[in-house]
Amino acid sequence: MNDQPMQDDLFFAEIAVLEDALEASHCAPSRLKARIYSSLVKRQQLSGPLLSLNRTKESGRDLCVFEELVQILPVGERAKRFNCCSVCHARILGEQLEHPPIFWGNCPYVAFRRE
């Protein structure tokens, strides 16, 4: 009987475990990711207005619950270029906690959280 297939399976299982360990050790903390994201959006605002929420949604990007609310409000485009994350408690929690207690979909600060 040939033991090669079983040895191969064990070999690849060990590689998978090592790969997971390496990936976890090279992952940036979610707090750092959140702070970098916030800084990038602030820097982007310095160069000009952000894309409006209407245009953002039309381009295929999903909006968070608060962006959806602002997007459907009967307000001008200038108001719809406002960075909702700048006043959202999810940003504050995301920048301070590794596992922030935020659970709504399409929030970038939820996406940064490590599971």
Image: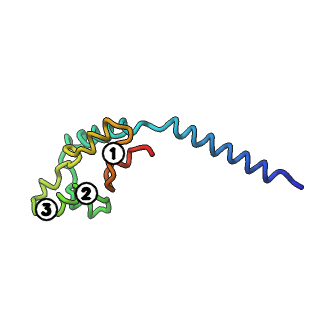
Q: Nearer the viewer, mark 3 or mark 1?
A: 1
- The N terminus appears in which quarter of the rendering? bottom right
Q: CA distance from mark 1 to mark 2?
A: 16 Å
Q: CA distance from mark 2 to mark 3?
A: 13 Å
- Name the N-terminal-most of marks 2 and 3: 2
Residue 101, placed above or below residue 76? above
Which residue lies under the disc numbered 1?
101
Residue appearing at x 26%, y 64% in the figure: 58
- Name the N-terminal-most of marks 1 and 2: 2
- Say which quarter of the image contains residue 54: bottom left
Which residue lies under the disc numbered 3?
73
- Name the N-terminal-most of marks 3 and 1: 3
Q: CA distance from mark 3 to mark 1?
A: 27 Å
Q: Where residue 21 is drawn, which disc sits there?
A: none
Q: How many marks?
A: 3
Q: Is residue 83 left or right of residue 35?
A: left
Helix, strand or loop at mark 1: loop
For mark 2, does the 10 Å Cα neighbourhood hold few (<14), some (14 to 19), or many (20 or more) residues? few
Task: Residue 22 in the image: state x and y as whole percent.
Answer: 57, 38
Helix, strand or loop at mark 3: loop
Task: Residue 68 in the image: state x and y as whole percent.
Answer: 22, 60
Which amino acid is tagged 1? Pro
Residue 49, placed above or below residue 36? below
Which residue lies under the disc numbered 2?
65
Q: Is residue 61 left or right of residue 27?
A: left
Residue appearing at x 31%, y 35% in the figure: 96
Helix, strand or loop at mark 2: helix
* Cβ atoms under marks 2 and 3 closer than 8 Å: no
Which amino acid is tagged 2? Val
Q: Nearer the viewer, mark 1 or mark 2?
A: 1
